[in-house]
């Protein structure tokens, strides 16, 4: 029976160690997120969750998506915010400047 253990590296990426034969564990790096997906995630983080990554992570956990690409992205963002609290203001500024989802959009839920 294959055994698998998932962990997160210092770089915020997910690593899965898998053994199918009883041989020593071999690391397999998960597929990184695409730039476009991350671009949209930044917008959702700011516009829907007002920059509160933990709230989005809680929602993902409650809907059995705690190991999704979105969750991995959010854990990475939280780690970066821990070392640079000003990063959220920078993300917010970039989201504002793109004009993709203006704050005064009638569909904005915040």
Image (spheres, rainbow, N blue to C red):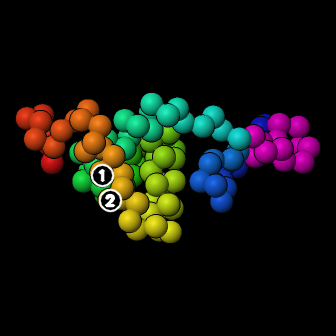
Query: In this view of the protein, which residue sits in the foreground, 16 or 84?
Result: 84
Q: Is residue 25 left or right of residue 29?
A: right
Which of the 4 image quarters holds residue 96?
Answer: top left
Q: Which mark is residue 1?
A: none
User: Which of the image's four quarters has the N terminus?
Assistant: top right
Question: In the rendered structure, which segment of residues is drawn in magenta?
Answer: 17-28
Whether tag 2 and tag 1 are in contact, CB under 8 A, the answer is yes
Q: At which x and y percent is residue 110?
A: 15, 48
Which of the 4 image quarters holds residue 33?
Answer: top right
Secondary element at image label 2: helix
Q: Which mark is residue 89?
A: 2
Mark 2 Cα within 10 Å, few/some/many (few <14, many 20+)?
A: few
Q: Is residue 44 left or right of residue 25?
A: left
Give me the C-alpha separation between circle 2 and circle 1: 5 Å
Q: At which x and y percent is residue 18?
A: 77, 42
Q: Residue at x 18, y 38 (%)?
A: 102
Q: Residue at x 59, y 53 (%)?
A: 12
Query: In this view of the protein, which residue sits in the foreground, 51 or 96?
Result: 96
Q: Residue at x 46, y 67 (%)?
A: 84
Residue annotated with mark 1: 92
61 lies above or below 2? below
Query: In this view of the protein, which residue sits in the foreground, 104 or 22?
Result: 104
Secondary element at image label 1: helix
Q: Residue at x 24, y 53 (%)?
A: 50
31 lies above or below 17? above
Q: At which x and y percent is residue 71?
A: 46, 46
Whether residue 58 can be seen here: no
Q: Is residue 32 left or right of residue 76?
A: right
């Amino acid at each position: 029976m294959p055994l698998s253990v998932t962990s997160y590296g210092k770089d915020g990426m997910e690593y899965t160690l898998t053994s199918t034969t009883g041989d020593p564990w071999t690391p397999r790096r998960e597929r990184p997120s695409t730039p476009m997906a991350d671009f949209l995630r930044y917008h959702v983080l700011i516009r829907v969750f007002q920059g509160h990554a933990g709230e989005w992570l809680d929602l993902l956990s409650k809907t059995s998506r705690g190991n999704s690409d979105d969750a991995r992205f959010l854990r990475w963002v939280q780690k970066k915010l821990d070392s640079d609290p000003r990063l959220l203001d920078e993300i917010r500024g970039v989201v504002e400047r793109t004009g993709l989802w203006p704050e005064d959009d009638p569909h904005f839920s915040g």
